[in-house]
Image (tube, coloured by chain):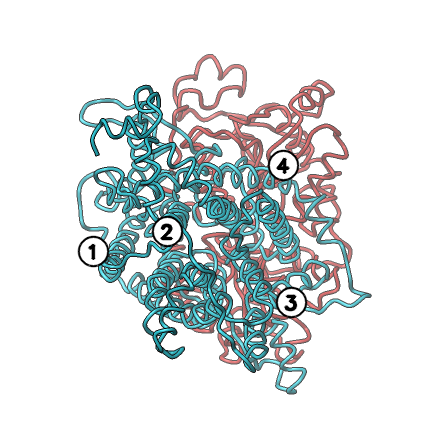
Chain colours: A red, B cyan
Amino acid sequence: MRNNIRRPSRRTVLTGAAAVAAGTAAGWPRVSIAQSPPAQEITPALIEAAKKEGKVNYYTSVEIKVAERIAKLFEAKYPGIAVKVERSGAERNYQRIGQEYASKIYNCDTLNSSDAAHFIVWKRDGLLEPVVPVDVAQHYAPEFKDADGTYATWRVMLSAIAYNKTLVKPEDVPKGFRDLLDPKWSGKMVKAHPSYSGTIMTATHQTARDLGWEYFEKLALQKIMQVQSAADPPKKIALGERALMVDGGDYVVSIEIEKGAPLELVYPVEGTPLITGPSAVMKRAPNPNAAKLFYLWSFTQEAQQAMVDVGALRSAHALVKDRPGRTALKDIKLMRENAAEVEKQADDIKKRYTHYFKV
Amino acid sequence: MTRLARSTLVQPEATRLRLDLSGPVLALFAALLVILVVLPIAWIAIFAFSTKDGGVTIANFVAIFGDAEFQEPLVTTLVIAISVGLICCLVAAPMGWLVARSDMPGRRLVRTLVTASFVTPPFLGAIAWELLAAPNSGLLNQAWRAISGAAPDHHLFNIYSLGGVIFVISCYTFPYVFVLVANALDRIPGELEDASSMLGARSWQTARSITIPMTLPAILAGVLVAFLQAMNLFGSPAILAIPAGFHTMTTKIWSLFQFPPKPELAAAAALPLLVLTIVLLRAQSAILGQRSYAVLGGKYGAPRPVRLGAWRWPALAICLGLMLLPVFLPYGALFNAAFSKVPSKLITWSTLSLHNVHFTFFELSQTWGVMRNTFLLAVLSGTVGTLLALVIAYLVARRAVRGHRWLGFLATAPIAIPGIVLGVGLFLAYTRSWLSVAGVDIPPMILYGTLWILLIAYLTIELPASYQQLGSAIQAVHPELEEASRILGATRLRALREITAPLLLSGVVATWCFIFVAVVRELSAAVILFTSDTKVLSVLIFDLKESGDLGAIAVLGLMMLAITTAVVWLANLIPGAEARRQASQM
């Protein structure tokens, strides 16, 4: 079980759903709600109430500059509501929230994680407030939202291979993960850590499932530079510190390329790990209205488009246009994401990973 | 002395009406110490011997010491600590002598530079050395390749290595040894050396029979402190060892607190460090126990500088050359990273950019809250911590209470606890809800999530060093001065206030600055104890480090240095503080 969160509020779980359910089912935690709550729009009353609260604490694992830019867009749209961005790795945030909640510290208003498995646990423990943005109801495919309306996919990204063009000759460019086991890459690769990053946790699960753990066992002998965040490997190859990244957020690579770094993405022939990053509103949010407003806004076409344009992430919103010139998801061979399996295997994944990579 | 004699010697009302408050004061401070030190250690001890459901077991120790995953970090840690202790001693002791006892030019400058390396947080130094000596992108390696024409993947230095870790830790640990040695040399009365040479001893004989024996306690204490610092440091190995694929004990302990947390194993891994430290401290007092260092009784002569002759300038050049490593090169690299777009490229006028500064101050939403927390905690810890250390050091030095040895031991004990483990001990102590001890329910004292828990952590962590500093300052004030005052009828507190305090003022200011600086740069306990509302600068920098945001780190790091420099400078403007002011006394 991945959850160390105490559960004082089992009895209060799942209120505020359908009006019918509220009266009859209160008192028992395992009642599942037949339908998600009605879709919500941003109303003047909500804006007014949010402005009275004046701030919102946003926990996220998205790259810090992207997160702060999204926050600034919200602040520009709703002046008087300050967004405080708490950025760390998804696995760290998961630990942090568990630790804070165990001590009855309710600081988080709304959160976004790159490990979808976390939402399974948080939902099961009754930490999440069901809120369905109207955009999610209308423009999101079922695989990108929780049936009970407690969370939805805010961002989609890939954990791809990338390299520095000044350090890798065109004829040497690897085609897939197994090419990285060639001794010529020894000491030239950088890689992020599944105990820190949700992106890497999810990607490690998919890669180990499809290629077997032997792949990681061999990879660990390649003198890998081990960093933490999935946002770091792109920065390390942009610096020229290593020639090639084994994993990491593709959107950060795109941002580095835009800044002028000589980087190039490789979608591995074995398949590229796909990661969805859901968001949710906390039931114990200290600023419930601002939390809800930020959440609703973050799924609007406008905000989702900004996330694509500014952050180079991908959106699950049907009306959002992807960046021009970028390879569409349907043209990339993808590995299949399975949050439920990640939830079950996370501890084992960390243990095996540490065993092979020593850290 | 008879009662009659006393009452005729002094003003009668002083003895009749004034209560000597020392008893209650002692009790209060002893209790405080127990709360600060014993409580977290007790929790760690309890956890080390506990199963997950609270049963008693030694399985945690078996798991730790039977497993190569833990044996390797233990060996690595010992190698690092011993190497750092020796390197610091070899570099800092001669340098301390040059600055304190020779006529080398620029002595003040060297002291200031050592101070600059001291106020540099080791983790910031480690990040700066990544910028300099990462095998491929490091500026020094790039420069070497440009000069030598070596192949692109050849490097001169690799900071991500055991040697790199030892080097960087030494860079920011040697000031401890330097300060202890320089201060000890400052206090050796010139008369002793004069007497020696008047009796016909040559310089070397004087050094061997007077200077070295008088300095030896400080050197040994310095090596011990360096060893323990290196053993318990978290930031530098986290930054340099993990990318290279190895752990030290502290980073291993830290990894045990990541999800799913295993505090029992971490506590078991921490206890040997505690035991080792106690053994070392006992050894130190066994070696030094018979000596007396009371050298500041009444008047003493100013130390007489040794003439270096032709070696004056080469000595300065060597000192400044050494200071390239902890100060000039790292800060150069940080400046470069702060104002360039790509930290691994040297800035030119055309690539000069303020975008990191703009991001740090106008986009990063945590900057200002974090600054406020850090400043508040540093000022509070400095003030409370100095007071605490002063009283304890006084009680121990003057053997003012029964069990003063225990007070001294308690005040020194936290040095054995890695900050990160202390963080967990405090976390365990101040987050639990109801606790039942022997059938009695104790109400919760939840401090996690407040700045108080960080204050307690900082007070505890800084206690050993500030206690030792003030302890040696007090030992240098001969008790005869106080005894004279007490014979004249003053209470212990009055003697303290009127005799000891003025003599100690510079030491007190130095200790306040020491704690202030140490709090600003503390990472390992804060990294466990912070919540988003109580985040401090070091944690923010560590967060940014984990996602590779070097530009913002450089800006925050330089600002950190600016703040600490300004505060230390202001504190030294206090009248009296400059009486025996030594910037290096810190």
Q: Nearer the viewer, residue A231 or B520?
A: B520
Chain designation of label 2: B
Secondary structure state at the residue bearing disc 2: loop
Report which residue position mark 2 lands on. B297
Amino acid type at image mark 4? Lys
Residue at image mark 4: A84
Residue found at x 66% / y 68%: B344
Question: Gap between marks 1 and 3, in whole Å?
Answer: 44 Å
User: What residue is rendered at 40% in x and 46% in y?
Assistant: B461
Which residue occupies 40% across, 47% down?
A: B470
Residue receiving disc 1: B62
Hey, what amino acid is under mark 1? Val
Viewer-side residue, A126 vs B339: B339
- The mark closer to the camera, 2 or 3, is 2
Q: Same chain, marks 2 and 1?
A: yes
How much space separates mark 4 and mark 1, taking CA atoms? 44 Å
The mark that comes first in sequence, 4 or 3, is: 4
The quadrant holding residue B446 is: top left
Note whether A199 is above or below A281 in the view shown: below
